[in-house]
């Protein structure tokens, strides 16, 4: 793997996983030394991250990890709604009903899963990932699939702001069960509608959590 590619993936993972939180200044000398690359491939990596919206110019010089504001979240969810509702609709028309029926059953039992605290939450997010992967495999549209993958980079960052509220996770499990069930039944309109409901509730929860955090900080 080229040095620029290696630096890109290392920085991308650190940003997505909040090891480099929003507002962190990415000094060229410091990051080049940390990643074991020269400054030229580091600049290449930073340019790619800025193009993806994960970093931004800082005070006319240098680069900073991009902030996540309520405005950012709303804009990302506007795009998410367009992409994921269409994906669910296509999955209902093209997917294997048995696959989604099994997922619906698993989500319907998620209360027991989430009752295991941290291990249960990890397993729950794995279940959500399997639903995403099943929809990806069903849609049969490589352009939509690539757009979804690009979007999910930002969604992983945003998820940290939700703070894993237990009641919200239980509600989200029911919403995911409804999405999987609609896809299993082959009802494209219901699948899109169920996805829209889930995204609306997720956005409202994120807004509430972020506003509460901002009031506490002030």
Image (cartoon, rainbow, N blue to C red):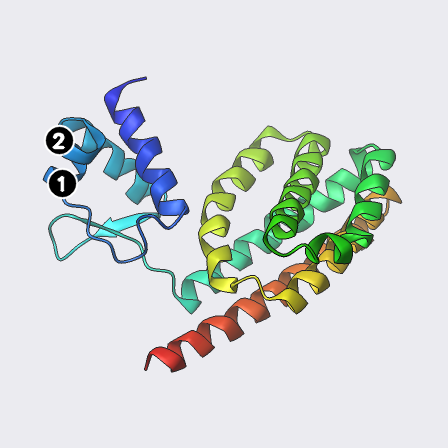
**For marks 2 and 1 on the same chain, the one whose residue lies earlier in the sequence:** 1
Q: In which image quadrant can residue 210 be found? A: bottom left
Q: Position of residue 55 (x, y in %)?
A: 29, 48
Q: Position of residue 52 (x, y in %)?
A: 36, 43
**Circle nearer the viewer, 2 or 1:** 1
* Rendered image: mark on residue 136: none
Q: Which of these two is toward me, 196 or 208?
A: 208
Quarter of image, res 8: top left
Instruction: Classify mark 2: residues with Cα within 10 Å, few (<14), some (14-19) or many (20+).
Output: some
Query: The residue tagged with tag 2: helix, strand or loop?
Result: helix
In this view, 95 is above or below 181? above
Per the image, the residue denoted by label 1 is 30
- Location of the N terminus by quadrant is top left
Task: Identify residue for label 2.
Answer: 39
77 relative position to 22: left or right: right
Is 73 placed left or right of 181 in the picture? left
Q: What is the C-alpha distance between the residues marked 2 and 1?
A: 10 Å
At mark 1, the secondary structure is helix
- x and y percent of residue 94 in the render? 79, 33
Residue at 51%, 56% in the rendered image? 159
| Residue at screen point 69% across, 30% down | 137
- Along the line of sight, which residue is nearer the eye, 81 or 166? 166
């Amino acid at each position: 793997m080229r040095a620029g590619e290696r630096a890109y993936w290392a920085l991308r993972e650190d940003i997505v996983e909040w090891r480099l939180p929003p507002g962190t200044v990415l000094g060229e000398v410091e990051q080049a030394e940390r990643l074991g690359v020269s400054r030229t491939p580091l600049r290449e990596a930073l340019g790619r991250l800025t193009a993806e919206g994960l970093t931004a110019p800082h005070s006319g010089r240098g680069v900073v990890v991009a902030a996540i504001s309520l405005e950012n979240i709303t804009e990302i969810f506007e795009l998410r709604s367009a992409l994921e509702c269409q994906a669910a609709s296509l999955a209902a028309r093209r997917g294997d009903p048995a696959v989604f029926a099994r997922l619906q059953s698993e989500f319907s039992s998620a209360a027991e899963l989430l009752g295991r605290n941290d291990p249960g939450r990890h397993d729950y997010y794995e279940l959500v990932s399997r639903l995403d992967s099943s929809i990806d495999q069903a849609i049969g549209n490589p352009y939509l699939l690539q757009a979804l993958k690009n979007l999910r980079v930002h969604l992983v960052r945003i998820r940290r702001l939700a703070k894993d509220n237990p009641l919200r996770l239980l509600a989200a499990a029911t919403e995911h069960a409804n999405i999987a069930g609609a896809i299993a039944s082959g009802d494209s309109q219901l699948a899109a509608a169920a996805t829209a409901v889930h995204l609306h509730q997720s956005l409202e929860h994120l807004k509430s959590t972020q506003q509460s955090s901002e009031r506490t900080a002030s």
